[in-house]
Amino acid sequence: MLHLKNLTYHPPATPAPILKNINLELAPQELGLIVGLSGSGKSTLLELLAGLAERTQGEIAWGEQELDAYDLQYLAGLVFQFPERHFCGGTILEELRLGHPELGLEQVKATLSEVGLDHLSFSTPPHVLSGGQQRRLALAVQLIRQPNVLLLDEPTAGLDWSIRRQVVKLLEKLKQHWTLLVVTHDAEGLAKIADRSWRIETGTLKAIDINEQLSLNKPS
């Protein structure tokens, strides 16, 4: 289980903390959903959990093991918003093997199968894929590392409604085997597959019933 206890992030250059006393628990094979507006701190929280920034205080643990930034770089996999902009490999195979040249073809094929891309040739350039396929490849890039927790920043951003629905269905399938933490400003579609949900405002996290909130926000 992922545990956050009193997690605070206050860079020296900012007058106030970006994140304040964040507490969160997420069990294995659950999908946690954090909803917040731009600038609320949700992407910063994922960067801390991915080991890309160092917390000011508080604890991050998986089970009984407290984790530092170095540990998190190996135990967490972060899929950025618009991940296709970060592709570096000339082919699907190169993209999946970046930093991991030892990965065998069977492992590559199994990972592509998990995200529904096993019908594609390993030699396919990532830039020729559709938007939905590129999002699937970005998930595969992290899943092939076998992370304890998969972190997703706005996974449906910039997609049309039909591709959004496909991505949501894929995330619902993935949570049968993986632990996922998703941050978004738009919970439509994602809310129905979330096991736990929170709202983040000005760096403060509060547990909510996201489906109840969405129903209250619908026009009568």
Image (tube, rainbow, N blue to C red):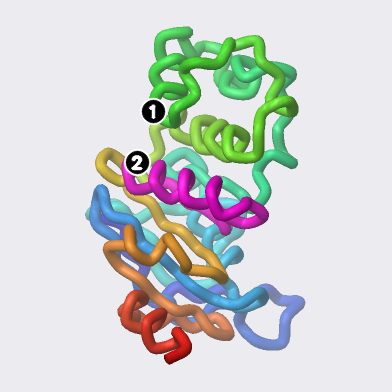
Where residue 83 sits: x, y (%)? 65, 43
192 up-or-down from 84: above or below: below
Instruction: Report whether 90 appears left or right of 93.
Output: right
Front-most of residues 80 and 49:
80
Residue 44 in view: yes
**Residue 114 shows which numbered tag?**
1
Q: Closer to the camera, 25 or 127? A: 127
**Mark 1, secondary structure of its residue:** helix
Give the amino acid type for the residue marked by disc 1 in the picture: Glu
- Mark 2 to mark 1: distance in Å? 8 Å
Q: Secondary structure at mark 2?
A: helix
- The residue at the point 67 percent across, 54 percent down is 158
Along the polypeptide, which appears first: circle 2 or circle 1? 1
**What residue is drawn where x is 32% and y is 82%?**
212
Looking at the image, residue 68 lies above or below residue 177:
below
Say if the magenta span includes residue 172: yes
Image location (x, y in percent) of residue 147 = 40, 38
- The residues colored magenta run 150-174
Q: Residue beneath label 2, please?
A: 174
Amino acid carrying label 2: it is Leu
Question: Would you say residue 149 sits in the magenta stretch?
Answer: no
Q: Would you call the spot at circle 2 few (<14 residues within 10 Å), some (14-19), or many (20 or more)?
A: many
- Could you say where residue 101 lies in the image, as x and y percent from the top left? 57, 13
Which residue is drawn at the image coordinates 62% and 35% (left, top)? 134
The residue drawn where x is 53% and y is 84% is: 201
Which quadrant of the figure has residue 1? bottom left
Q: Are marks 2 and 1 in contact (CB under 8 Å)?
A: yes
